[in-house]
């Protein structure tokens, strides 16, 4: 998967199209990602002891990984290519400018 936790991504399809945020969690088996403040749903939460109160909370729901693009600091939303350093380490590089993402 080209997207990892903490990456800045832009949503390219769906109700939140055009918005940018950070990846909170990656679910590789399902091919989904959870992005902060994107695809938010209201959920009823049950009280759990004295720490968590009951009520309606906003929860970020997973979206398909094909609906997000990685954002390069210089170019904006880009596709990702594989690159190899002189030491043989594999890294993700921007398809437009060639810089490391």
Image: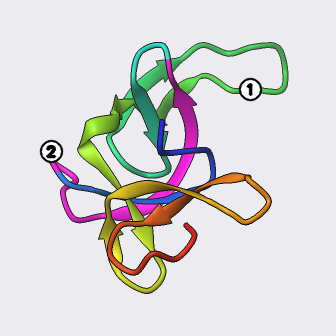
The verdict on residue 18 being magenta is: yes
The magenta span reads: 13-28
Mark 2 and mark 1 in contact? Answer it, CB < 8 Å: no
Residue that sits furthest to the bottom in the current view: 74
Q: Is residue 72 above or below residue 74?
A: above
Q: Is residue 46 above or below residue 38?
A: above
Left or right of 6? Residue 39 is left
Q: Is residue 55 above or below residue 3?
A: above
Q: Secondary structure at mark 1?
A: loop
Left or right of 10? Residue 45 is right
Q: Is residue 38 above or below residue 33?
A: below
Q: Nearer the viewer, residue 14 or 45?
A: 14
- Residue 46 shows up from this direction: yes
Judging by the rendered image, the residue that carries numbered circle 1 is 52
Residue 24: percent from left, percent from top: 58, 44
Residue at 48 percent across and 35 percent down: it is 1
Residue 19: percent from left, percent from top: 29, 64
Judging by the rendered image, the residue that carries numbered circle 2 is 14
Residue at 68 percent across and 26 percent down: it is 53
Q: Nearer the viewer, residue 59 or 87?
A: 87
- Residue 60 shows up from this direction: no
């Amino acid at each position: 998967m080209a997207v990892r936790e903490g990456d800045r991504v832009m949503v390219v399809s769906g109700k939140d199209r055009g918005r940018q945020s950070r990846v909170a969690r990656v679910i590789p088996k399902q091919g989904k990602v959870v992005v902060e403040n994107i695809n938010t749903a209201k959920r009823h939460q049950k009280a759990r002891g004295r720490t968590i109160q009951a009520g309606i909370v906003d929860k970020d729901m997973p979206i398909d990984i094909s609906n997000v693009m990685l954002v390069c600091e210089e170019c904006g939303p880009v596709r990702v290519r594989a690159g190899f350093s002189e030491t043989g380490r594999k890294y993700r590089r921007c398809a437009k400018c060639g810089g490391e993402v």
